[in-house]
Image: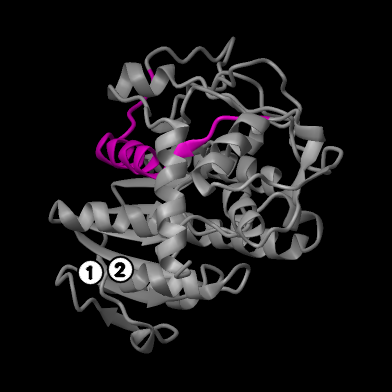
Amino acid sequence: MKFLITGSAGFIGSFLALRLLERGEEVVGLDSINDYYEVAIKYGRLQKAGIPQELVAYNTLAQSKKYPNYRFIQLNLEDKENLLKLFENETFDKVCNLAAQAGVRYSLLNPDAYIQSNIVGFLNILECSRHYGIKHLVYASSSSVYGLNEKMPFSTSDNVDHPISLYAASKKSNELMAHTYSYLFNLPTTGLRFFTVYGPWGRPDMALFLFTKSILKQEAIDVFNYGEMLRDFTYIDDIVEGVVRVLDNIPKLDSTWNPKNPDPHSSKAPYKVYNIGNNHPVKLMDFIEILEKELGIEAKKTMLPLQAGDVPATYADVSDLVNELGYKPSTSIKVGIANFVAWYRDFYQI
């Protein structure tokens, strides 16, 4: 099959591209390569897939030097004209939309970026998928959609009408937009609510990366909510396995749909939403302690209140993933942190 992966220079997208390539699929990767975080890491991820930086140019397909079935194009999702041309020329079977303006805290500073990328850009993906006969559109949502909900673990049957950041609101909007297109145009869509993804090649704006960088420099780390945080840290390999299983399972009409008592998880349309999390929340201070042991350095800590837009705890109910796709993430936090630290030391030659 032929897949389009948007956000393929990103954390999850780069791993997903390699996974699909290694099982023999044809893949076109797309990414804007914006400078929200260190672009050297994005180019490093592309290099892993055989796309050196010198081949990258806007709206130009670059052929991988490592995988004959992989090409990459730098393109903004907001560029509807060229996105439509790409869909017309390539005749994709399935699309996995992982491109987005990420980050809860940054959405407080630059809200326009979230509307352009996560709303306008996603609308363009929906339009292209509708008009060019995509068999299955899978897209990244986020655990942040649960917002003020404090009922643990978070279930896809829970109400998610109370987001507390524009980032979360944009992801909730994606789910609503996808449902509309699934219903009106019979476009199969599946949303994935990711829970705190971490691992080698991870995002520099995430806690594990920030903590590791500061600890190695003997600088203090910022510990929010005075350390009283729980996070359902989910290792990158587990995330990718979940995404692949979802891509392979096209949603059908839900026979349990009850219009007189609608469950947020079910739908009359070919539409699904899954949590992908480790189903095992970890205390932030335990997370830091494991990292300290792996680095062999005790961290200096600055204890701070909860930041605007953050939630004190996340915890994924993955029963749908288990029951419907036979899969449950399982990588331990100790193994995941050790793998990240080994990668970090190698990448930065420390």
Residue type, label 1: Tyr
Q: Nearer the viewer, mark 1 or mark 2?
A: 2
Which residue is at 64% across, 51% downward?
Answer: 211
Crowding near pointer 2: few (<14 within 10 Å), some, many (20+)?
A: some
The residue range painted magenta reads 230-254
The residue identified by callout 1 is 70
Which residue is at 77% across, 63% downward?
Answer: 110
Residue 302: in sight, yes or no? yes
Which residue is at 49% across, 43% downward?
Answer: 294
Above or below, 116 against 305 in this view is below
Residue 79: in sight, yes or no? no
Which residue is at 83% across, 38% downward?
Answer: 306
* Horizontal arrangement in the rendering, residue 64 relative to residue 319 (left or right): left
The residue identified by callout 2 is 48
First-in-chain label (1 vs 2): 2
Above or below, 207 against 334 in this view is below
Above or below, 82 against 134 in this view is below
The part of the image, by quadrant, that contains residue 217 is bottom right
